[in-house]
Image (cartoon, rainbow, N blue to C red):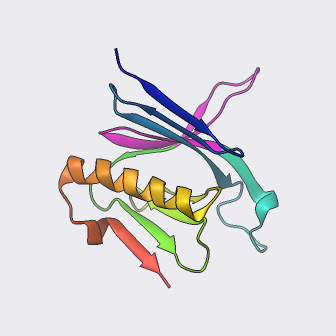
Amino acid sequence: MGFMLLFNLQNLIFISEAETGLVKFEVLCDKDPYPKKVVGEGNLERRMLEMNRKRLKVVKPGSKTTFPTTEVRGSYAPPFHVETSRSDQRRLRVVVDSENEVDIVVHSRHLRDVVVLVTHGFAQRFNSTSLNSLLKIDT
């Protein structure tokens, strides 16, 4: 029987199941992917970022009346990469392919780094791509 780790610090959730290789993060995503105004905290909705050894997906959680909805799903095959920015250290962008990408906001820079490291760990096992092609840092 495997074990599960669960951390909950100020709306931060990190779940890891060792046996299945499943990692989940609670993140925030933009409601409107093409905003007409400056993006702020008011435009964000809660999502679950789920990663396993084969694929990554972003799920909109369900409620009493709705089922969970998968918004982005894809494997770690190229052109998969993660983009980070030095100007906003809580944001990252996960690009699965030219049609599937998601902007994510996390609680802190440290959590962003954990998400990036876990993603790269799974991606390097999946397709043995170099770390430089998996991570793009904007200045």
Taking the spot 33% from the left edge, 56% from the top edge, the residue there is 120
**Residue extending furthest top?**
1
Label tally: 0
Q: Which residues are magenta?
A: 47-71
Rendering coords of residue 60 (x, y %): 63, 38
Q: Is residue 22 left or right of residue 76?
A: right
**Residue extending furthest bottom?**
139
Q: Quadrant of the N terminus?
A: top left
| Residue 116 included in the magenta stretch of the image | no
Rendering coords of residue 106 (x, y %): 62, 56
Q: From this viewpoint, is residue 100 visible?
A: no
Position of 26 relative to 65 (above/below): below
Most foreground residue, 89 or 8 = 8
Q: Is residue 43 left or right of residue 97?
A: right
**Residue extending furthest left?**
128
Q: Quadrant of residue 96?
A: bottom left
Rendering coords of residue 93 (x, y %): 51, 63
Position of 135 relative to 76 (above/below): below
Rendering coords of residue 57 (x, y %): 47, 42
Position of 89 relative to 124 (above/below): below
Taking the spot 79% from the left edge, 73% from the top edge, the residue there is 37
Most foreground residue, 8 or 101 = 8
Taking the spot 38% from the left edge, 50% from the top edge, the residue there is 118
Q: Quadrant of residue 8?
A: top right
Q: Quadrant of residue 131?
A: bottom left
Taking the spot 30% from the left edge, 39% from the top edge, the residue there is 53
Position of 37 relative to 45 (above/below): below
| Residue 50 included in the magenta stretch of the image | yes
